[in-house]
Image: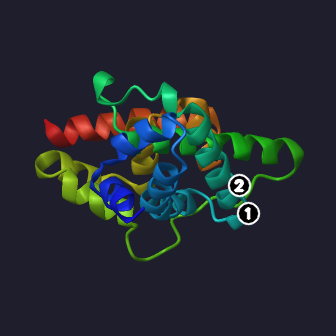
Amino acid sequence: MRSGRKALGELDEEGLVRLVAKGDRVAFEELYRRTSPWMAVRLRRRCADEQIVAEVMQETYLAVWRAAGAFAGTAVGGTAVGWLWTIAARRLVDAFRRRAHHAEPPPAAASRSLAPAAEEEVLAASVGGDVGDALRRLAPELRQVLQAMVLDGLTVRETAVLLGVPEGTVKTRARRARIAMRKALA
């Protein structure tokens, strides 16, 4: 078992997903151990309701267990981590829709903290130069729309549900963000 555990430790997340597709529970546990902490942080940045976050985490990893065989990976330019986040983001939107259908929308994570979010710091560090400077100068509501639509790959409707604003507002903010980015980079 120790040598098996060590071998799993040497695999990247894509290798783990491939083993999960074959029904390997130990690989699934390792994938969960590696990815669940950052997944929970990212979800909490978008939703302050711990019950929804826990529900989305459970649904995400259940979907991973069931659909690991459908992961195309680097063959289509994707990553295992990106695939996991796509599943989680869509599950979060679904959870918001379910809640909105039955009651008031859950309290979304507002930009109420004074310190920048870890994601914003990583984004700022990974996107440098003129593009990074232009992103940092965007208003927070414009940056949130760009993050959801461009980085997370959500649709206008999913972004609207995620941010708790009308679809028209998302479209307007996306347009304003593109204009501001073009102007800053010209």
Q: Residue beneath label 2, please?
A: 55
Looking at the image, is 74 positioned above or below residue 136?
A: above
Q: Secondary structure at mark 1?
A: helix
Furthest residue toward top = 76
Observer-nearest residue: 33 or 91?
Answer: 33
Residue displayed at 34% across by 41% down: 15
Residue displayed at 64% across by 58% down: 108
In the picture, measured across the screen, residue 143 lies left or right of residue 88, that is left
Looking at the image, is 148 positioned above or below residue 69?
A: below
The spot of residue 165 in percent (x, y) is 63, 44
**Could you classify mark 2 by the number of other residues whose Cα lies within 10 Å: few (under 14), some (14-19), or many (20 or more)?**
few
In the picture, measured across the screen, residue 185 lies left or right of residue 11, that is left
In the picture, which quadrant includes the N terminus? bottom left
The spot of residue 179 in percent (x, y) is 31, 34
The spot of residue 147 in percent (x, y) is 41, 45
Q: Are dots 1 and 2 in contact, CB under 8 Å? A: yes
Q: Residue beneath label 1, please?
A: 51
Q: Secondary structure at mark 2?
A: helix
Residue displayed at 36% across by 47% down: 13
Disc 1 and disc 2: Cα gap in Å? 6 Å
Residue displayed at 35% across by 54% down: 8
Mark 2 is on which residue type? Glu
In the picture, which quadrant includes the C terminus? top left
Mark 1 is on which residue type? Gln
Q: How is the image coloured?
A: rainbow
Looking at the image, is 43 positioned above or below residue 181?
A: below
The spot of residue 148 in percent (x, y) is 46, 42
Count how many numbered circles sit on residues in the image: 2
The answer to whether any part of residue 165 appears in the image is no
